[in-house]
Amino acid sequence: MNDLLPRYPQDLLQVAEELNRKFFQIFGEKGPSFGMELGLIGVSQKESTITFLGCGRPLLLIRDGEVI
């Protein structure tokens, strides 16, 4: 699994889908309530952007002590 980010450096969704596929290969299907929550953040210094992918996890931005 350590090779996912180098293989898909610009595609967080592809990384999450691969992790999900491998997760169920390892643990099997246990029903609709069985799974994983995941938050991925991609940072591009070249483009000055931050990308977030949340699978069951929210992104909270705190600026000057206030949640935005």
Image (spheres, rainbow, N blue to C red):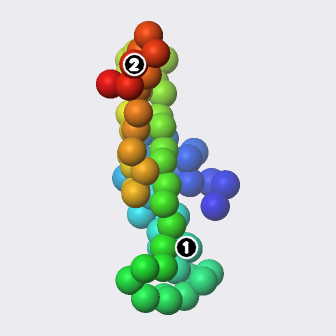
Q: Nearer the viewer, residue 62 or 47?
A: 62
First in sequence: mark 2 vs mark 1? 1
Residue 41 is situated, as x and y percent measured from the top left of the image, at 48, 37
Q: Which mark is residue 66?
A: 2
- Is residue 47 depicted above or below 40 in this figure? above
Q: How far separated are the C-alphas under marks 2 and 1? A: 38 Å
Q: Secondary structure at mark 2?
A: strand
Numbered marks: total: 2
Quadrant housing the N terminus: bottom right
Kindly identify the residue that appears in the image at 56 percent across and 82 percent down.
25
User: Which kind of residue does numbered mark 2 sit on?
Assistant: Glu
Kindly identify the residue that appears in the image at 48 percent across and 44 percent down.
40
Q: Nearer the viewer, residue 10 or 17?
A: 17
- Is residue 46 depicted above or below 42 in this figure? above
Q: Circles 2 and 1: CB distance less than 8 Å?
A: no
Residue 4 is situated, as x and y percent measured from the top left of the image, at 56, 54
Kindly identify the residue that appears in the image at 42 percent across and 63 percent down.
17
Q: Which mark is residue 11?
A: none
Kindly identify the residue that appears in the image at 39 percent across and 19 percent down.
66
Seen in the image, is 34 located left or right of residue 14? right
Q: Residues within 10 Å of mark 2 (few under 14, many from 20)?
A: few
Q: Which residue is mark 1?
A: 22
Q: Residues within 10 Å of mark 1 (few under 14, many from 20)?
A: few
Residue 13 is situated, as x and y percent measured from the top left of the image, at 37, 52
- Is residue 67 depicted above or below 23 in this figure? above
Residue 68 is situated, as x and y percent measured from the top left of the image, at 32, 24
Farthest residue, direction front: 65
Q: Secondary structure at mark 1?
A: helix
User: Which kind of residue does numbered mark 1 sit on?
Assistant: Lys
Farthest residue, direction right: 2
Q: Is residue 15 visible?
A: no
